[in-house]
Every structure is written in structure tokens, then in C-alpha cells.
Amino acid sequence: MNVTLAVKQYVSKMIETSGSGMKVLLMDRETTSVVSVVYSQSEILQKEVYLFERIESQNREPMKHLKALCFLRPTKENVELLVQELRKPKYSVYFIFFSNVISKSEIKALAEADEQEVVAEVQEFYGDFIAVNPHLFSLNLTGVSRGRSWEPSMLQRCTQGLTAVLLSLKKCPMIRYQLSSDLSKRLAESVKQIITKEYELFDFRKTEVPPLLLILDRSDDTITPLLNQWTYQAMVHELLGLNNNRIDLSRVPGVNKDLKEVVLSADNDEFYANNLYLNFGEIGTNIKNLMEDFQKKRPKGQQKLESISDMKAFVETYPQFKKMSGTVSKHVTVVGELSRLVSERVLMEVSEVEQELACQGDHSNASQMVRRMLQNPRVSELDAVRLVMLYALRYERHTNTILPALKGELERRGTSEHLKQMVSRVVDFGGKRVRGSDLITANDAVAITKQFFKGLKGVENVYTQHQPLLHDTLDQLIKGRLKDSQFPYLGPSSLRDRPQDIIVFVIGGATYEEALTVYNLNRTSPGVRIVLGAATYTIQGGNYWARPPLKSIGL
């Protein structure tokens, strides 16, 4: 099961269907993201697609020499825009592809508008989601719920996105959901309703063991999104912001103008693909090795590369090298900025305290560590609040709680009112009263593992080990031990065998740490294939909790 490949195949088939000749790709805001994540512009240009336009753009010029490939979500707005387009067509012929199921009445409206008979094809290609990684997808939604209830339009959109994933992977699954979450049950029922209604679309070849869809709620594990991560993709997303594979580096001090926005795509960047899940120290070492290989090709001018600063200076000193190695200069800039932020925000020290709170049970020691970090002026406002949030979740009902004192420390630091409110809100959202699973127990405490990488001076990186709750849930599921009392099946049927194809969907967002868990389970569990998805763009740390208002917890 590979969601990236599924979307790429849809796009390739669209282009093939239209035959040879120059083409324009007409998209909406959402399908633009769907395509841009799996295909670079240069790749599509090689397939005779020379122009990219938005359906809502009012300034498009008529170009009768071009064929139009329309890839659109089947919304009322898009159908109306298409109707207007077909009444006054700007292109010679139209091949229309909807990213999800479209109604007969809307097809009729399009047919009636096509008076000049320019439409050659209308099909449904179910690429209605963002394929972040081969085993990870997102719907890029925000505000999916109001408290414990679905925002009606968001329930429909999540249902559409999830059924599109199932159709693209050719899976008609049995469904399990998190019993403690009404949101999970509603979504499970909504997906089942579509599968029943569109039974012909879901009439795939039966497998010996039916696929399984497991629907979870973020509220069951609110700790994982609060932890800093040390793998490359997760750090880039958390510290720099990764949006549809793009990073904005314009605020990086002294950044080259060519590197103000860079693209990180595992499909088109071998270094990124190889280092996606490696920790920060290993990445620094790998960049050093790569640059030294290039440096050896030069007859003279040998330099020692002792730190990331040396690497940046090296790249800037040799323009011809820079021209040869755009990938290297990009990653040196990215890793250099990550290194600067880690140092500036003392993130290794912050991370150790986070791990103490998440994985250990020594209240006295944890209290001292959190207090010490709150008194450190180098700790950012957001990191300080996250530490207090972790403390509030971990020691929610401890008899000797120091939560009022920690809130006082936040007050003394001048923390904004919005962020201070997050402490109580995170407990309301994912505290002990709400959780369906026992997220924190003394018996399940995971020891912190530290690995020091001293091959690259200046990056003595600490790799911290934390297992998200999703790991235990999937481990139990794979072994056939996941309790029906906590994760019931929708309907009377249940699996007799251990599941092999598993689609997991987390309402409220998934994290890159959980994506790494799925990646590792796929590697180490023979015969098991897992895909992870979420309503909101993949989250980690402050990028999740710092968005107002928290009540719209889909974020």
C-alpha cells in the first residue's frame, strides 16, 4: 500500500488519456496541493503539460491550441465554475477528472453546458488527499470539530477523503473505531454508509484476510504532539515549517537568495530520501561525508570540515561547487538553521525534560527539572508552556502537584494569555477523564536512550526514545490482541485472522513520530502493510497546540 504511488498513477493516467499534444492542467486550490506533493513541475513538463492554471482564475487567456486536463474536487463551486468554462471554452478539448464521487445531477449540468461539445472525457480519479509519504496521508483540514462534536462540513470532507484513500488503494475494509470517542464512531458510520451506497465502486477482489480501517481520536494521546523530535523530517516540520514539501527559509540569517524557499521531496532528492528518518547527529555526519567526497574531486584547496559553520563557508567559497551540488547546499543550509535553532532554544535540554515527563515517574525530580527550565531565559515561551502542559497531563491528579506554582512561573515570564490557557485546555481535551486508553502508567514507563554523535563537532546530538501510544495500539492489533471492548467493530462481523492491510486514521492530526512508528512496523512486521492518515496536516509540538482556538481541536 503506497499512497504516493496511487496519486502519481492517477496523474499519469490523466495525461495518458488525453493523448499527445500540448496541455494545460486546470486545478483548484486543493488539487494543486495534491499534485504538487507527488510531482515536480519539471517532471510534468516532460509529459507535455506546459501550463498550470487555477479554475477560479478570471484572467486566463483563450488558448485553443491547448488541451485542458481538469483535475478538480467535486464541489458545487467547482461544478459551477466548470459550467461557466464550458459555455465559453478557452481550450480546444476538455478531459475532466474529479477527485471523488460526483452526482448524476452535476454530470447532467455539465452536459447541458457543453453546447460546443468540447468535453472528451469525464472520470473519477480518487486522489482526494495529500500523500505526504508513501505510508502517510493528510487531508490538510483545520477546525474539524467543535468540542466533542463534528463540524458537519468537516465530517463530510473527512468521509470523502478517507473513502478516496480506500478507493485509490482498492480496499473495502472492515472498520474498527475508538469507543471512547463519539467523533470516531460518527466517522466510522459515515464511511460505512458511503461504502454501502457506492458498493459497486468498492467491489474489489476479495482477499483471504479483509483489510482493516482503524479510526482513532487524538485525545487518546495528547503527549506525543508536545514532544520535540530529532529525526530529519520531523525537525524540519517542527522548527522550520514543512508545507506541501516546501520550506520557507527567507528568515534564515544570511541565506542565499536562491535558497529562500526550498523543496524537500523524497522522490526527487536522494539525500533527503536516505536521511528522512535518521536522527540529527547522523544527518550532520552524512552531510560532512557527502561534502568531503565532492571536495576530494578538487585538485587543491582541501579544507577540514569540522562544523556546520565550516560547511556553509565552504559552499559559499566555491561557486562552481555550489552549482554542481544544489542538493548539498540546500541541506547544509537547512541543517545549519536547525542547528542554530537547537542551540538558541536549548532544545536538547528541553527535550531531556520532556522525556523525563513523558517516560519516567519521579515526580520530585520532574518538578525540579521543569522549574529549572522555566527559569532559563533561553527557553522559548512556547517550549516553556509545552513543558507545563506535559507536567499537567503527566501529574494531573498527583497529591503534591506544583501546577499552580508552574503557572506562576509562566506569569512571571510574561507568557501570553492565549498560551497560558493552553495548559488547562490540553487537560480538558486529553486528560485522564477523557482518554479511553491508559496513556500513563508506572509499568509502561519507557527509559530514555541517549546516543551521542561526536563525529561532527558542534552537533553532539541527543537522540531521545519515546514510543507513542499508536505503537502499542498497532502492536496489539497486529498480534490479534486489541480489545474489542475499547476498539469495537462497526457491524456484526469481525476478523478471525490477524490483519495484514491496515489503514489508520487519526481525527485531530497525526505526528511525524507516529509516521516513523508506522514506517518501522512496516519494515519489521512481515506480511503487514500499514498506512497512517489524519484530518489535519501532520503535526508535532508547538505547531499543533499553539493555534487558536484550541476548542477546534482538529486544528
Image (cartoon, grey):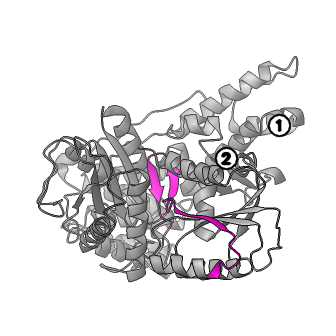
Q: Residue at x 76, y 66 (%)?
A: 92
Answer yes or no: is residue 120 visible: yes
Q: Amino acid at mark 2?
A: Val
Under mark 1, the amino acid is Lys
Query: What element does badge 2 sit on?
Result: helix
Magenta segment boundaries in residue numbering = 113-140
Residue 408 at what x, y percent from top left?
A: 40, 75
State left or right for residue 84 relative to residue 399: right
Q: Report the Cα–Cα distance between label 1 and label 2.
A: 15 Å
Classify residue 312 by image quadrant.
top right
- Residue drawn at point x = 76 percent, y = 50 percent: 48
Name the residue: 78% across, 35% down: 325
On the image, numbered disc 2 is attached to which residue? 334
Q: Nearer the viewer, mark 1 or mark 2?
A: 1
Q: Quadrant of residue 242?
A: bottom right
Q: Position of residue 140 (x, y in %)?
A: 51, 66
Judging depth in this view, the residue of 329 and 213 nearest the camera is 213
